[in-house]
Image (cartoon, helix red, strand yellow):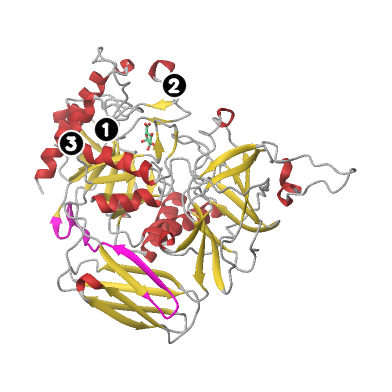
Amino acid sequence: MNLKYALIAVSMCFSCGGTWAQSQIINAYARDNRSLNGEWHAIIDPYERGRHDMWKNRKPQNNNEFREYSFDEGIVLNVPGDFNSQLPELKYYEGTVWYGRYFDMPEPATGETLLLYFAGVANVADIYLNAEKIGHHEGGFTPFQIDITGKVKDKDNFIAVAVNNNRRPDAIPAMNFDWWNYGGITRDVFIIRLPEEHIADYHIRLDKRDPKLIHADVALSRPIAGRSVTISVPELNISKVLTTDSEGKASTSFKAKNLVRWDIDNPKLYDVILTTEKDTVAEEIGFRNIKTEGTEILLNDRPVFLCGVSFHEEIPQRKGRAFSQADAAMLLNEAKDLGVNFIRLAHYPQNEHIVRMAEKMGFMLWEEIPIWQGIDFGNDSTQAKAVRMMSEMVNRDKNRAAIAVWGIANETRPSEARNAFLAKLKETAQSIDDTKLISAAFDNSSWNKDKKCWEINNDPALDLVDIVGINKYVGWYENWRADPSEMGWNVKPEKPLIFTEFGGEALYGRHGNGEAKWSWSEDYQADLYRKNLMMFENVVNLAGVSPWILFDFRSPTRFSPLQGLEFNRKGLTSDRGQRKEAWYLMRDYFNTKNKDR
Ligand code: GCU
C-alpha cells in the first residue's frame, strides 16, 4: 500500500441545504482514474469538537503552541468500507468520523479537468482539500463528484472527508429501519483525469417498444455547438457522427438490423465507443425491451415470470458493507445457485460492481432509494433530497439494460403528502429514463373475511405503478385466517402483481417445533414457504415472487439472543452461507417457473 499519509482532519459541518457536489460524470470507472482507496487515518469525534479547525491539519509551530488533535499514529480505517465493522468500538457508532490522507498527483495536471469522485459515503459528507472546504453531499448510496481542477499540487495534497451517519427525522432513510446503520466511506474513491472538453453524459438504449430502434443522447462538458461526436457499435457495423448544439448536446436514433437483445438467458452486451476530437469513452451496453401488457411482464415481447430474491449490500460473514467485485460475486453467485432471474437490490442503490456484474450474469434488477416506512413526506427539504437521490441513482444506471424496475417506495401509508411525494419520484425517474418500469412495495393489504381475500383499499399510489409489489408475511407477522389454498388476492387485478417480500425467520440448524413461530426452526420456515406458495397460486395477476431475503442480515432491531442476536433470520441462507430447508424449496419452485418461459 503506497500510503503517504498524515493526519488530516475533516470537519463535519452540518451545512444545511443541498449538495455542493456537481452533476455526475457517466461511466466513472471507465475513465482515467487515480485510486484513493487504501488506509486513511481517522479520528472519532462524537461531540463534533473538530469542526472549527481540525481539518486545517495544523501542527504546533513553536514551544508555546499545542494541538488538541493529531492523527499521526492514530487509528487507521480502510477505504472503501464501513467503519462500524472495522473497529469494535465503532460497532454501534452513530456520529462523526474524520477521515484523511495525503496524496501526490502522479503526473502534473496540466490543462485537464480533475474530478474527485466518491462512489458512496454513508451518509453525510463534507470534503476538504488543502484546508479548503470544497464539497458537501447527503445520501449514503449514490455517487457524487467535486471538480478539483486547479486545486491540487504535484505533491502532498491533503484530502479530508467528514462522515456522519446520525439518523435524522428529515433524512432518507429516517429514524428507524431494519438494517445496520453502517457509516463511512463505504465505496471507492478516485480522481478522474479528463480533457477539459470531454464526454460528460450519454444515454444509449433500445426504444421502449421497437426491437431494432436505438436512441442515443450525448452531452459534452461544455456548451459548445458544432463539435462532432461519433457513436460506434463495431459488432453491429454502426458508426454515427453527431454534431452538438449550442448546449453541447446531440441526439440521434438509428436502426440496428442484426441486434441481439439482452435477455436473462442471453445477457448480450455490445461494446459502444463514443469519441470526440479530445475524448473517448467505452461502455458495454445491453439492448432490450421491457413492458407490461395486461397482467404480464414482457421482456423482449415474451412473458417472463419474476423468480426473484432480495439482498442487502452486506457480507454477513464479515458483518460489514459489501463494496468489492469479490463481494458482488459472493452475493450474486448465491442468487444464481438459487435459480432466480430477478433481484430486488434492497433498500437503496447498491454499488456499481453489483449492478454491472448482475447485468453480465443475466439478472433483471429492481433498484430503489430508501423511501422506507416513516419518511417525513410533508417536508419540502426531504422531498428535495429524495428527488436528488433518485436523480443520482437513475443517472448512474440509466444505461443498464438489467434494470427492469425503478422502485419508488417501501411500505408507506397513503396521505396527500405521500401520494404527491411518490408521484414526484416517479416523474423524476421517468424524466431521465423511461425505459424501466415503475413499482413500489405495498404492505397495507387487509383481509376481507367475507370474500376470503386480501385487498388494498383506497391507495392512490397503486395507480402510479406499472407493477404492484406486495410485502406480506402471512405465517409470520400475520396468521393464517383460512386455508392457504382458499386465500385469494384482489389487488389491481388488471396489473401484474409480484410478492416483493414474504417469509419468516429460522436459525440454521434448528429443527423441531415445526408448528411454532417461536421455534425459529427451519421446519417452521419451510412450512411457511410451502403455504405461501400455495396461496400465491390463487393470485390471478401473479407475475413474480421474491422472498425476503437471500441472506440473514444484521439489524439493531433484532434483540433475541436465542435467535442469533442482532440478526434478522429471514434469510434462505444463513449469515455463514449455510442453506436452510426453505432455500431448497424455493430453488425447486424457481426451476419449475423458469421452465415456463
Ligand atoms: C419489511 C421491510 C424489510 C424488513 C422486513 C422484516 O417488509 O421492508 O426491510 O427487513 O419487513 O421485518 O423482516
Residue 116, percent from left and from top: 55, 59
Q: Is residue 140 left or right of residue 353?
A: right
What is the three-letter code of the residue carrying label 3?
Phe
Task: Say which quarter of the image contains residue 205.
Answer: bottom left
Residue 118, percent from left and from top: 51, 54
Q: Residue furthest top?
A: 513
Q: Which residue is pictured at 49% across the width and 74% down the height?
A: 221
SS type, badge 3? helix
Q: Which residue is mark 3?
A: 536
Sequence-wise first label, 2 or 3: 3
Please tell me how crowded label 3 is: few (under 14), some (14-19), or many (20+) other residues with Cα within 10 Å: many
SS type, badge 2? loop
Q: Which residue is pictured at 28% across the width and 59% down the height?
A: 401
Q: Which residue is pictured at 26% across the width and 14% down the height?
A: 511
Q: Could you tell me if the residues under marks 2 and 1 are in contact, i.e. CB atoms within 8 Å?
A: no
Circle 2 or circle 3, nearest the eye: 2
Q: Which residue is mark 2?
A: 565
Q: Which residue is pictured at 87% across the width and 46% down the height?
A: 62
Image position of 15 with respect to 451: above or below: below
Residue 160, percent from left and from top: 64, 51
Q: Is residue 97 left or right of residue 597?
A: right
Question: On residue 447, which mark appears?
Answer: 1
Q: Distance from label 1 to label 3 (Cα)?
A: 15 Å
The answer to whether residue 315 shows anywhere in this view is yes
Please tell me how crowded label 1 is: few (under 14), some (14-19), or many (20+) other residues with Cα within 10 Å: some
Q: Which residues are magenta?
A: 275-302
Q: Is residue 368 left or right of residue 595?
A: right
Q: Identify which residue, 537 or 109, lies in the foreground.
A: 109
Q: Could you tell me if the residues under marks 2 and 3 are in contact, i.e. CB atoms within 8 Å?
A: no
Q: Distance from label 2 to label 1 (Cα)?
A: 33 Å
